Amino acid sequence: MLDGVQVRTVPEQLVLTERRHVALEQLPAWIGAAMGRLLRSAERYGGVNGAPFVVYHGDVDEDSDGPAEACVPIVPVDAPSGGAMRQEPAHREAFGTLRKAQVEFPQILSAYEGVAAWVASRGLTVAGLPREIYFTDFRSASPSDDVCDVALPIE
């Protein structure tokens, strides 16, 4: 499923967040709606400052409802927020890129498994929660377009 796994360094980011326990069948709609709200809110803080992403604080599958956290990086600000805002720490992450047609459950799980196997095969350690980084407009993308990375923070 993955064409390859790469490693990158992600700088510390200030992010607007929305976190929710969400059932598997509601996940795609919730991600789209939450990202829309967060992207609109980001304009009050100087705009978006990186690719939006979703962090999974627990499994979202047939038996579990997460929670999941939608995150939009914003320009660092000193003013207090009117919503949920937090610092995402700097980290290294292993990631693989997916086309839109691959971002469906359950096939997306094989991408996470592939990244995890790559990490283990190199003697690295997973050092954070799994995530999906959305670097293009998912809704307007065609099924063959690259739309997101599945990633695992590593050390």
Image (cartoon, rainbow, N blue to C red):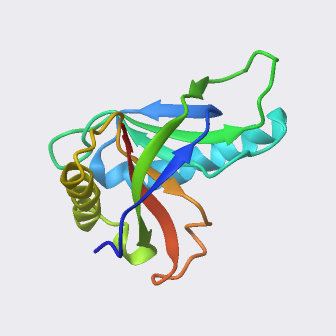
- Where is residue 137? Give x, y as percent: 62, 66
Front residue of 47 and 8: 8
For the N terminus, the quadrant is bottom left
User: How many discs mark residues in the rendered view?
Assistant: 0
Q: Residue furthest front?
A: 123
When asked about the image quadrant of residue 14, the answer is top right
Front residue of 114 and 144: 114
At x 28%, y 63%, the residue is 111
Give the answer, above or below, for where 64 lies relative to 29: above
When asked about the image quadrant of residue 106, the answer is bottom left
For the C terminus, the quadrant is top left
Give the answer, above or below, for where 56 lies relative to 112: above
- Where is residue 152? Give x, y as percent: 36, 46
At x 22%, y 46%, the residue is 123
Front residue of 36 and 120: 120
Q: Residue furthest top?
A: 80
- Where is residue 27? Give x, y as percent: 38, 50
Give the answer, above or below, for where 6 lies relative to 8: below
At x 82%, y 17%, the residue is 79
